[in-house]
């Protein structure tokens, strides 16, 4: 694969160890390797990686094969670079909409920074390492198969101390076992940190390319102060000198993990774009949205890439053209599943005809059919508050917040006060309504 991949998802060891989680299958098409993933989390969407990149004269044939494989279901091209995106936009204009999920960007560091934790910005890491060295009698060893049982024991201890995301953590344990079962065949390199005779941390990874080493797994017993910076530094010091960069993979949108990765002062974030084919409906929805709200196409396409599903986009047409629409985004909240109504819009010359009311009532009916607890929306002004009160929406005295890098509010967090229509009998807590939107 030329000089190897660009991001952690291109590392063969990752593709292999996570294959069951993501349903990875592969084929060779023309001059490219195509990896398809398809999971329940993708709602039936197929995700395709074209390796090493999309920049080939054979791309039209490859895309046709992917389209035929996907059948009638939508699909995404994933893990695209900036140059891949520009290539698609240049050679296939108005064919794809693009998204750049922040939670999927890889963190890339200068490996020498990890070897020394030099400079003022890394002083806290340096202090943690010094404290660890002064406090504990430690030793570092190369990770070998004889240590795998101890590593799995430590991983279970680490996992028991984590809260939430149990499915993700369970899949990670499965992947770690796959890494260990084929450690030598995958040509993995790792390290282990001991305090006296107790294993307190381990890590391992593999090259992405000739200059970049990818850290697949790093686990530690946090009861030992400074243990994570310590294992990170020792492992970097033992890496072959050919590696200039270390990739510590993505943060998955987890606040604690993001804070930790940023604290190591990344050299850059390696963006990963995805591309979803534009249907005629999506083109019309984009135009309507842009005309009504004056949002940039880039933002509109990011929202639609993440949250659009034909079954949850309620529209009305005139002469075959979409003139009114409402997107329902399912969200997990403290009160259960709710439907968030977003971008309710009607073309200017079709207003005052009751179309917005129709698509709003369609969305409410859908939420009822899915046994959601409530539907909610954020009106932009008092006139809209009065309008939605007619449907039974009531104002909530606390803001609505989203676990999402894509702003789904008004654009002004001080004005993001929702109105809520209860569909079930429950008591709405008197606090911020924190939502985790489904993708």
Image: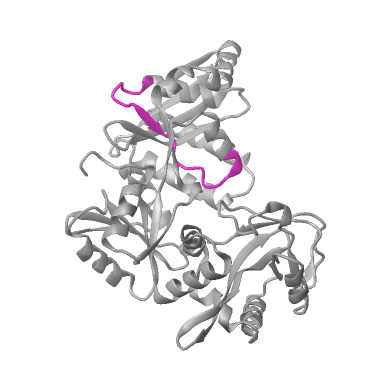
- 406 or 123: nearer the viewer: 406
Residue at the location (80% across, 72% down)? Answer: 425
Q: Is residue 199 above or below residue 438?
A: above
Q: Could you tell whether 83 is left or right of 62 in the image?
A: right
Please state the horizontal and vertical placement of residue 120, each as a whole percent of the image.
Answer: 54, 18
Q: Can residue 43 be seen in this view?
A: yes
Q: In this view, does 148 lie above or below 61?
A: above
Which segment is the magenta one? 238-257
Helix, strand or loop: magenta stretch: loop
Image quarter hosting the N terminus = top left
Q: Quadrant of residue 32?
A: bottom left
Query: What is the x, y in percent for residue 400?
Result: 71, 57
Q: Where is residue 382 in the image (x, y as percent from the top left)?
A: 77, 67
Of residues 286 and 163, which is closer to you in this image?
286
Q: Which residue lies furthest to the bottom in this view?
A: 319
For the view shown, which residue lies furthest in the front direction? 349
Q: In which quarter of the image is residue 242?
A: top left
Q: In which quarter of the image is residue 96?
A: bottom left
Residue 198 appears in the figure: no
Q: Is residue 278 magenta?
A: no
- In percent of the image, x 71 and y 70: which residue is there? 373
Query: What residue is shown at x 29% (from left), y 42% (from top)?
Result: 5
As drawn, 166 above or below 148: below
Q: How many marks?
A: 0
* The residue positioned farthest toward the top in the image shown: 134
Q: In this view, does 183 lie to the left or right of 352?
A: left
Q: Residue at x 35, y 66 (%)?
A: 94
**Would you place residue 144 above or below residue 356 in this image?**
above
Q: Position of residue 350 (x, y in %)?
A: 58, 83
């Amino acid at each position: 694969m030329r000089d190897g991949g660009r991001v952690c998802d291109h590392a063969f060891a990752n593709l292999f160890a996570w294959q069951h989680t993501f349903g990875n299958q592969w084929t060779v098409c023309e001059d490219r390797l195509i990896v398809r993933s398809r999971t329940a989390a993708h709602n039936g969407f197929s995700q395709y990686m074209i390796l090493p990149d999309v920049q080939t004269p054979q791309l039209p044939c490859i895309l046709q094969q992917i389209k035929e494989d996907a059948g009638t279901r939508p699909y995404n091209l994933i893990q695209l670079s900036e140059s891949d995106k520009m290539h698609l936009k240049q050679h296939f204009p108005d064919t794809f909409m693009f998204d750049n999920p922040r939670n999927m960007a890889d963190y890339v560091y200068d490996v020498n920074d990890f070897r020394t934790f030099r400079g003022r910005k890394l002083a806290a890491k340096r202090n943690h390492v010094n404290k660890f060295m002064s406090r504990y009698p430690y030793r570092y060893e190369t990770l070998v198969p004889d240590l795998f049982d101890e590593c799995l024991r430590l991983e279970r201890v680490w996992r028991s101390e984590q809260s939430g995301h149990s499915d993700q953590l369970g899949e990670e344990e499965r992947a770690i076992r796959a890494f260990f079962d084929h450690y030598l065949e995958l040509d993995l390199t790792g390290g282990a940190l001991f305090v006296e005779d107790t294993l307190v941390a381990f890590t391992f990874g593999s090259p992405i390319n000739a200059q970049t080493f990818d850290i697949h797994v790093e686990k530690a017993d946090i009861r030992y102060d400074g243990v994570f910076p310590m294992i990170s530094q020792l492992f970097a010091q033992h890496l072959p000198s050919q590696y200039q960069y270390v990739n510590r993979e993505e943060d998955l949108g987890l606040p604690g993990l993001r804070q930790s990765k940023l604290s190591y002062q990344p050299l850059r974030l390696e963006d990963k774009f995805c591309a979803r084919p534009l249907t005629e409906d999506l083109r019309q929805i984009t135009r309507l949205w842009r005309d009504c709200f004056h949002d940039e196409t880039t933002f509109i396409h990011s929202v639609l890439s993440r949250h659009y599903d034909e079954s949850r986009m309620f529209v009305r047409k005139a002469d075959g053209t979409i003139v009114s629409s409402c997107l329902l985004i399912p969200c997990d909240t403290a009160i259960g599943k709710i439907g968030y109504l977003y971008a309710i819009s009607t073309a200017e010359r079709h207003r005052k005809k009751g179309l917005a009311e129709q698509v709003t009532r369609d969305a409410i009916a859908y939420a009822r059919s899915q046994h959601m607890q409530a539907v909610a929306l954020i009106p932009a002004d008092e006139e809209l508050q009065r309008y939605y009160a007619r449907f039974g929406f009531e104002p909530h005295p606390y803001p609505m917040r989203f676990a999402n890098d894509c702003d789904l509010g008004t654009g002004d967090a001080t004005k993001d006060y929702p109105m809520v229509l209860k569909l079930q009998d429950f008591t709405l807590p008197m606090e911020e309504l924190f939502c985790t939107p489904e993708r």
